[in-house]
Image: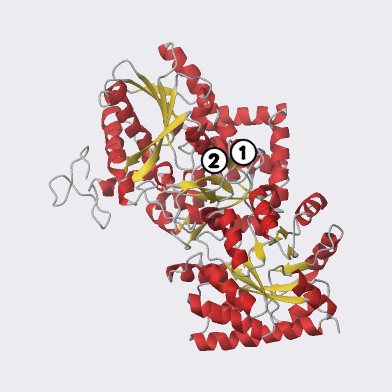
């Protein structure tokens, strides 16, 4: 099921959606699914279920570290279907975020079919641009899945048009040039990118990369349709002394962020 | 397995290649392609590059016939293309000078590069020094340890060397880190990718900057022996020296093109970098090509005595040459490569890079198959100065503390006999 209705509901509440990323398999498959459940309970609207990958060129140290540990722990690609089932069962949107090769290896059509069967909404593809995505676009359309492609501050008007015209669900705006990771300032570049993107699409535009506090979520929520948080959430788990503590810290941060998106336009 | 029938042909070799990178990099790749395509038809750029090749690199590089080595190749005639004699000691300078000039044309002031053995890093640091560009080289921690002298060379040339501690701590992880840097600094920085892989236009552009190798060698062989060679052999890591020497011969149907991959401890051992023996098509570092991967699409770590061939993927044009049947690829083990390394050193007085020694080992095989009438052209892509430490350890010439070990010392091994 598309995340479109979830984002529409948030829009009707006059607030940005909160989108939270966690990799499946860290600290364990069960532990990561429990953590995703905590996100949903704490007010996250859409969960980005991350696929740990051996060569994550778009990720900073926090997510790289979690991916390495998840892979060392034996996480398998099929575990994301279990996670998608749990997340969608809990009432949140379940989007899978993955580098392209695992999907290619699994088989694009087979992946799409299995994702639908698990209740997944679609894919966010950080290293797959629409120009190279013919096979995925066909499979996604056939299976009624969301296709979330990325735009960046460097995107030209021609690229914004080409990318947004192929998106479904929302458009993922990477707020700053660089890899994932919390940043002190999420700034004006994001606002400008969202405005430029809106000139080409009526889809929701969600902003990712860098948000780590409720105040930042509120700031971004003023102009974006969704606030995407990754590294800050992952760090709650990677830096915790125990799983229990990690979940506690995760819940607290998710609630702070959820509060942020709810007060941003009031 | 994916089908490639419905992907656009743009930037592809058959079904291989493409541009699998974050959107943030697409404008930079578009700019690079535009500036490159204009430059190669601009007499000013072409003239400058030719001048540098002649007065700085030392082109044309010579060919050398090696009859004493050829006795170990079934008596076939063996001719080496001496890219080892280029300034900085390998073919890598051909590509780097081209890209450094493009960097200047794009108005960028900083270059970054990945390196495995250090040859590409040294070449990039050299070009950066020559053109006054800021330079950062990413190198896997494991490679900084086995190629310590090249780290020092790069730093002496004014480059910053960053040791990469992620993943397997080798070349593929250095590439990852270079991409991360590039995404963050693309406004001022050009990524001087060192081989014929990565997102379009790199595979085609890097090949074209190396194409001079085959253009020169083809004429030189014709002048020397009066006919084309029966086979052209080159080692294949990413595959730049091989594409450089192969490309001019692609239309010469009688000439076999043979790429030699790193067989490590043997393909059956699992510890190797024989992508065409054990890899399957997939995406790594921006290109759809052969990748060593597990059933979940996770990259499998490669292994080789040669840091420059220790890479789990390969340039997409090689994948196309394999699938189209125009080129053939074989795996050469560490042991075979080191035997060839020793043989060339002792029979001809030429210390080859361990990478290039894989091509020499291939010549020993192919020469024995073809016999005395055959003419083999081998790309000697680099010199072995950087490998003296590795080779000395391999042959037991130094002890664990780095001190010399002479023949009557305990544990010393004879040269020319593999471990």
**Label 1 secondary element:** strand
Q: Position of residue B233 (x, y in %)?
A: 41, 29
Which quadrant of the figure has residue A173?
bottom right
How many numbered markers are drawn? 2
Q: Does B250 sit above or below residue A228?
A: above
Q: Position of residue A126 (x, y in %)?
A: 64, 59
* A42 vs B209, nearest the viewer: A42
Q: Does A86 sit above or below residue B192?
A: below
Q: Position of residue B245 (x, y in %)?
A: 49, 29
Q: Are marks 1 and 2 in contact (CB under 8 Å)?
A: yes
Please name the residue shown 63% across and 64% down the image. A179
**Res A253 label:** none
Colour option used: secondary structure
- On the image, numbered disc 1 is attached to which residue? B12
Question: What is the chain letter for disc 1?
Answer: B
Q: CA distance from mark 1 to mark 2?
A: 8 Å
Q: Position of residue B108 (x, y in %)?
A: 70, 48
Compared across the picture, whether B336 is left or right of A146 comes to left
Q: Does B16 sit above or below residue A195?
A: above
Question: What is the chain letter for disc 2?
Answer: B
* A67 vs A136, nearest the viewer: A136
Mark 1 or 2 closer to N-term?
1
Point out the image quarter for the C terminus of chain B.
top left
Q: Does B365 sit above or below residue B401?
A: above
**Res B316 label:** 2
Residue B138 shows in the view = no
Q: Around disc 2, counting alpha carbons within 10 Å, would you say few (fewer than 14), some (14 to 19), or many (20 or more)?
A: many
* B144 vs A237, nearest the viewer: A237
Does mark 2 fall on the same chain as mark 1? Answer: yes
């Amino acid at each position: 099921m598309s995340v479109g209705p979830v984002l529409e509901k948030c829009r009707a509440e006059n607030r940005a959606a909160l989108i939270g990323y966690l990799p499946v398999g860290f600290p364990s498959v069960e532990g990561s699914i429990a953590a995703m459940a905590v996100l949903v309970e704490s007010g996250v609207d859409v969960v980005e279920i991350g696929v740990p990958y051996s060569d994550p060129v778009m990720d900073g140290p926090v997510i790289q570290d979690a991916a390495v540990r998840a892979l060392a722990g034996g996480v398998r690609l099929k575990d994301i279907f279990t996670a998608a089932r749990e997340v969608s069962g809990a009432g949140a949107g379940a989007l899978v975020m993955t580098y392209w090769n695992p999907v290619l290896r699994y088989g694009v059509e087979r992946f799409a079919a299995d994702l639908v069967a698990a209740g997944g909404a679609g894919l966010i593809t950080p290293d797959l641009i629409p120009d190279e995505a013919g096979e995925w676009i066909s499979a996604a359309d056939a299976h009624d899945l969301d296709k979330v492609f990325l735009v960046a501050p460097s995107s030209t008007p021609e690229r914004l048009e080409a990318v947004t015209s192929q998106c479904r669900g929302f458009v993922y705006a990477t707020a700053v040039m660089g890899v994932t990771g919390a940043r002190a300032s999420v700034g004006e570049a994001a606002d400008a990118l969202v405005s430029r993107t809106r000139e080409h699409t009526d889809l929701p535009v969600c902003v990712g990369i860098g948000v780590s506090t409720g105040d930042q979520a509120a700031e971004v929520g003023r102009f974006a349709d969704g606030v995407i948080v990754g590294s800050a959430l992952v760090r709650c788990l990677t830096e915790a002394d125990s799983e229990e503590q990690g979940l506690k810290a995760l819940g607290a941060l998710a609630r702070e962020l959820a509060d942020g998106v709810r007060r941003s336009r009031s | 397995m994916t089908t490639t029938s419905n992907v656009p042909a743009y930037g592809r070799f058959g079904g291989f290649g493409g541009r699998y990178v974050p959107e943030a990099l697409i404008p930079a790749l578009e700019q690079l392609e535009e500036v490159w395509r204009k430059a190669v038809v601009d007499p000013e750029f072409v003239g400058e590059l030719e001048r540098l090749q002649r007065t700085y690199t030392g082109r044309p590089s010579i060919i050398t016939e090696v009859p004493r080595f050829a006795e170990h190749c079934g008596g076939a005639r063996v001719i080496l293309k001496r890219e080892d004699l280029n300034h900085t000691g390998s073919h890598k300078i051909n590509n780097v000078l081209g890209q450094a000039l493009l960097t200047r044309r794009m108005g960028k002031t900083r270059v970054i590069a990945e390196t495995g053995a250090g040859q590409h890093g040294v070449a990039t640091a050299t070009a950066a020094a020559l053109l006054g560009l800021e330079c950062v080289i990413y190198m896997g921690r494991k490679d900084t340890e086995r190629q310590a002298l090249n780290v020092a060379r790069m730093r002496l040339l004014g480059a910053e060397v960053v040791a990469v501690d992620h993943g397997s701590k080798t070349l593929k992880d250095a590439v990852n880190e270079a991409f991360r840097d590039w995404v963050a600094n693309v406004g001022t920085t050009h990524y001087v990718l060192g081989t014929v892989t990565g997102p379009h236009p790199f595979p085609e552009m890097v090949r074209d900057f190396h194409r001079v190798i085959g253009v020169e060698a083809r004429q030189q062989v014709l002048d020397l022996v009066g006919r084309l060679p029966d086979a052209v052999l080159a080692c294949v890591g990413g595959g730049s020296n091989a594409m450089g020497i192969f490309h001019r011969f692609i239309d010469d149907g009688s000439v076999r093109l043979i790429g030699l991959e790193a067989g490590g401890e043997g393909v059956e051992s699992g510890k190797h970098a024989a992508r065409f023996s054990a890899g399957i098509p997939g995406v790594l570092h921006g290109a759809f090509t052969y990748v060593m991967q597990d059933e979940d699409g996770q990259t499998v770590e490669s292994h080789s005595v040669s840091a420059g061939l220790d890479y789990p993927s390969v340039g997409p044009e090689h994948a196309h040459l394999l699938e189209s049947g125009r080129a053939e690829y074989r795996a050469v083990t560490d042991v075979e490569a080191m035997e060839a390394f020793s043989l060339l050193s002792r029979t001809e007085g030429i210390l080859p890079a361990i990478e290039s020694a894989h091509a020499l080992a291939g010549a020993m095989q192919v020469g024995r198959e073809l016999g005395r009438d055959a003419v083999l052209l081998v790309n000697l892509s680099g010199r072995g100065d950087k490998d003296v430490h590795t080779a000395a350890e391999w042959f037991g010439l130094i002890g664990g503390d780095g001190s010399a070990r002479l023949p009557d010392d305990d544990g010393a091994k004879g040269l020319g006999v593999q471990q």
